[in-house]
Image (cartoon, rainbow, N blue to C red):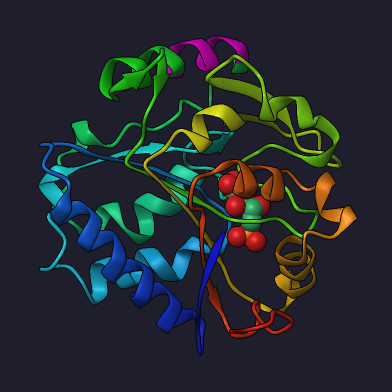
């Protein structure tokens, strides 16, 4: 696990974007397949992509998928696709057929199956597991990532590619990538900003016992080289060489 800490969230977003552009350039394949998360953290990243790097990103080579999606209508304020469309897709030259949204408005079980087949037909696989070029993750205040919550650690090792998950509390259904697929990606990045994540990140980087119960920790330690792009607020408690 490596961390790249920037003074603020804008600097962290720029730093990560510069690295992603390098990965896209290095990747000789036609398609660069990205699975993105939702929530609030990626908002600044998506703004940076179209406001500061519109010309530098080779949009025609990107294909977008979701790490997880809430089972709601795409027009719902909770929709990860709806948020990303408003902030990013409406402002960049990506062909619509290269944006593969989860149909959050239909039956979760049916959509899980449909989306799994769609991803398998678009993303190269290794031993039957899709290998995304980049999986972009956030971390919840409870240590969840994707929609793998601490009360359902079995999704870390599930043989399903996408699973139906339920958010504790709200009981909102989600469609989520499972742990083994995430850790198979060429690049796994956690983009984490804000003071509220400092304690979680401290537990993760210290390998504290409590972190064992965080899906984010389990994913990070199972990856060859998970990268954490942080702002100084989120990285406040971490030690530096
Ligand atoms: C989602 C995300 C989820 C998110 C974390 C962090 O659909 O909510 O995919 O895994 O990354 O909950 O959320 P914030 O970025 O809003 O803190």
> Residue 108, position in %: x, y?
61, 18
In this rendering, the answer to whether 50 lies above or below 65 is below
The image quarter in which residue 149 lies: top right
**Rendered residue at 69%/79% (across/down):** 238
Most foreground residue, 103 or 198 = 198
| Residue 88 at x, y percent in the picture | 31, 58
Q: Which residue range is magenta in the image?
A: 109-115
In this rendering, does residue 71 appear at all? no
Residue 11 image point, x, y percent:
41, 83
Determine the residue located farthest toward the bottom in the rendered image: 7
- Quarter of the image for residue 236 reads bottom right
Which residue is found at the position 19% from the left and 57% from the top? 92
Residue 237 place in picture, x, y as percent: 74, 82
Quadrant in which the C terminus is drawn: bottom right
User: Magenta part mainly helix, strand or loop?
Assistant: helix
Q: Is residue 61 above or below residue 141?
A: above
The residue shown at (54%, 73%) is: 230
- Where is the N terminus found, in terms of image quarters? bottom right
Magenta stretch holds residue 111? yes
Q: How many marks?
A: 0
Can residue 134 be seen in this snapshot?
yes
């Amino acid at each position: 696990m490596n961390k790249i800490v920037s003074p603020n969230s804008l600097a962290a977003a720029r730093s990560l974007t510069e690295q992603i552009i390098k990965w896209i350039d290095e990747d000789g394949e036609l398609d660069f397949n990205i699975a993105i998360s939702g929530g609030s953290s990626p908002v600044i990243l998506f703004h940076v992509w179209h406001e500061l790097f519109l010309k530098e990103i080779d949009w025609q080579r990107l294909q977008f998928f979701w790490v997880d999606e809430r089972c709601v209508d795409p027009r719902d304020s909770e929709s990860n696709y709806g948020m990303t469309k408003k902030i990013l897709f409406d402002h960049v030259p990506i062909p619509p057929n290269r944006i593969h949204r989860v149909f959050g408005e239909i039956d979760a079980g049916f959509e899980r199956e449909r989306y799994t087949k769609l991803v398998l037909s678009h993303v190269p696989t290794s031993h039957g597991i899709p290998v995304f070029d980049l999986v972009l993750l956030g971390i919840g205040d409870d240590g969840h990532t994707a929609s793998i919550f601490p009360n359902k650690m079995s999704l870390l090792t599930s043989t399903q590619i996408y699973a139906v998950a339920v958010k504790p509390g709200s009981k909102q259904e989600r469609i989520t990538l499972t742990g083994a697929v995430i850790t198979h990606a060429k690049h796994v990045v956690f983009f984490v900003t804000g003071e509220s994540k400092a304690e979680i990140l401290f537990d993760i980087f210290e390998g504290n016992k409590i972190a064992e119960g965080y899906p984010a920790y389990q994913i990070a330690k199972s990856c060859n080289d998970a990268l954490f792009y942080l702002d100084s607020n989120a990285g406040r408690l971490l030690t530096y060489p």
